[in-house]
Amino acid sequence: MSWQELSQLVSISFVCGWCGNKVATDEGYFNSLNGARISPCPHCGKPSFFRGDKQFPGASYGDDVKNLPVDVAEIYQELRQLHATGAWTSIVLLGRKLLMHVAVSKGAGENQRFIQYVEYLCDEYVARNNRGWIDRVRTLGNTATHDLQIMTKEDAELITDFSAMILKLIYEFSPPEAP
């Protein structure tokens, strides 16, 4: 077998795809045939697989956001986790869906046209100088939905970064709603 347990490998640092901590380790297994490596996270103990510049499971991209409703939090976490797979078009599409869930969680009616959700968020929750974030998510989401265009890593990072800003603005930095 070509996998060898080595007591000391070259130390690597990485963000653990399981627990999200930035860690470093010199322990694990190395495959001399293909240069792959399996190393345990020193924080949670779960294994990560490395080959070249790829890591499995990969780390989530983007910021954590507090005070999210359950469905909004689930979609946002899914969006962040997709970065580890390189599913750029899926991330952009999911960013569009995230806006719909945010609008409904804040009082917009269900089963509306997408533009109505965008207008609701802009009218009720987003300052005029911050509407560009929502518009950029909308336009990239529309491109991914309606055009035969493959989205890029940069598009996906932009969607995730803007989504985080929108979520923080609406849920984290807003005063609590009256009961």
Image (cartoon, grey):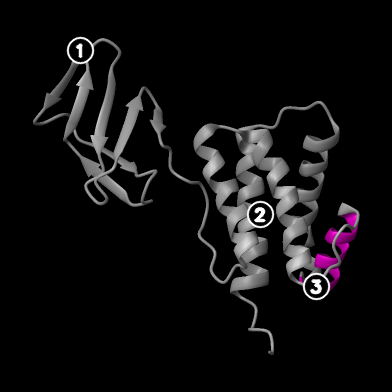
Badge 2: few (under 14), some or many (20 or more) residues near its Cα, within 10 Å?
many
Q: Is residue 110 above or below residue 53?
A: below
Residue occupying image coordinates x 16% and y 35%: 27
Q: Is residue 55 above or below residue 1?
A: below
Gap in Å between the C-alphas at discs 1 and 2? 45 Å
The mark closer to the camera, 1 or 2, is: 1
Q: Is residue 79 above or below residue 163?
A: above
Mark 1 residue type: Ser
Question: What residue is shown with label 1?
Answer: 2
Instruction: Determine the main secondary structure of the stretch shown in magenta.
Output: helix
Question: What residue is shown with label 3?
Answer: 107
- The quarter of the image holding the C terminus is bottom right
Question: What residue is shown with label 2?
Answer: 162
**In-front residue for pair 176/126:** 176
Residue 54 lies in magenta, yes or no?
no
Compare marks 3 and 1 and give the one earlier in the sequence. Answer: 1
Q: Which residues are magenta?
A: 115-125
User: In x, y percent, where is residue 1?
Assistant: 18, 11
Mark 3 residue type: Gly
Residue occupying image coordinates x 15% and y 29%: 9
Residue 118 lies in magenta, yes or no?
yes
User: In x, y percent, where is residue 17?
Assistant: 39, 43
Q: Which mark is residue 160?
A: none
Q: Secondary structure at mark 2?
A: helix
Compare marks 3 and 2 and give the one earlier in the sequence. Answer: 3
The mark closer to the camera, 3 or 2, is: 3
Q: Are marks 3 and 2 in contact (CB under 8 Å)?
A: no
Mark 2 residue type: Phe
Residue occupying image coordinates x 57% and y 72%: 67
Compare marks 1 and 2 and give the one earlier in the sequence. Answer: 1
The answer to which image quadrant residue 8 occupies is top left
